[in-house]
Amino acid sequence: MTEATPTKPHEPLILIQANELTRIIRQAVEQVLDARGYQLEYELLSRSQVAALFRCTERTIHNWVKRDGMPHRRTGNGRLVFDRKAVAEWAHAAGRPMAGV
């Protein structure tokens, strides 16, 4: 965290990096959900991590996304990420064995 010029003389302005803000928000959401008896159950994987799970190339993963509808998300900068559970369910339905499951 870094202090910057405050908008009002008595209020400090704090600058924070996006990844730190994401961590803080995720932690707050997890605390609220935990207090209500819920739990976040997802693990995001990169394209290379998914390729390792299937013991295939990243190009194959790209093809499965485009051609076969492998579930994925795009980050703010356009990078593909994959929810491990959704990918495992997709793989099971598609008859594609995963090495890491």
Image (spheres, grey):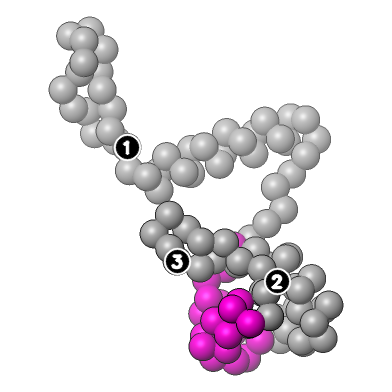
Q: Main secondary structure of the magenta part?
A: helix
Label annotation for residue 87: 2
Q: Is residue 92 left or right of residue 12?
A: right
Q: Earlier in the sequence, mark 2 or mark 1?
A: 1
Q: Which residue is mark 1?
A: 16
Q: In this view of the protein, can residue 61 be seen by the observer?
A: no
What's the distance in space between the residues labelled 2 and 1, CA to CA? Answer: 33 Å
Q: Nearer the viewer, mark 1 or mark 3?
A: 3
| Image disc number at residue 40 | none
Q: Secondary structure at mark 2?
A: helix
Where does the magenta region start and end? 44-67
For residue 100, which quarter of the picture? bottom right
Crowd tier of the residue under label 2, counting other residues whose Cα lies within 10 Å: few below 14, some 14–19, many 20 or above? some
Q: Position of residue 34 (x, y in %)?
A: 73, 36
Tag 1: residue type?
Answer: Ile
Give the residue drawn at x 48%, y 38%: 24
* x then y, percent, for residue 65: 61, 77
Q: Quadrant of the N terminus?
A: top left
Amino acid of disc 2: Val
Task: Work out whether 71 lies above or below 35.
Answer: below
Q: Residues within 10 Å of mark 3 (few under 14, many from 20)?
A: few
- Of badges 2 and 1, the one in the foreground is 2
| Within-10-Å neighbours for mark 1: few <14, some 14–19, many 20+ | few
The residue that disc 3 covers is 79
Question: Is the C-beta separation of discs 1 and 3 under 8 Å?
Answer: no
In the foreground, 66 or 79: 66
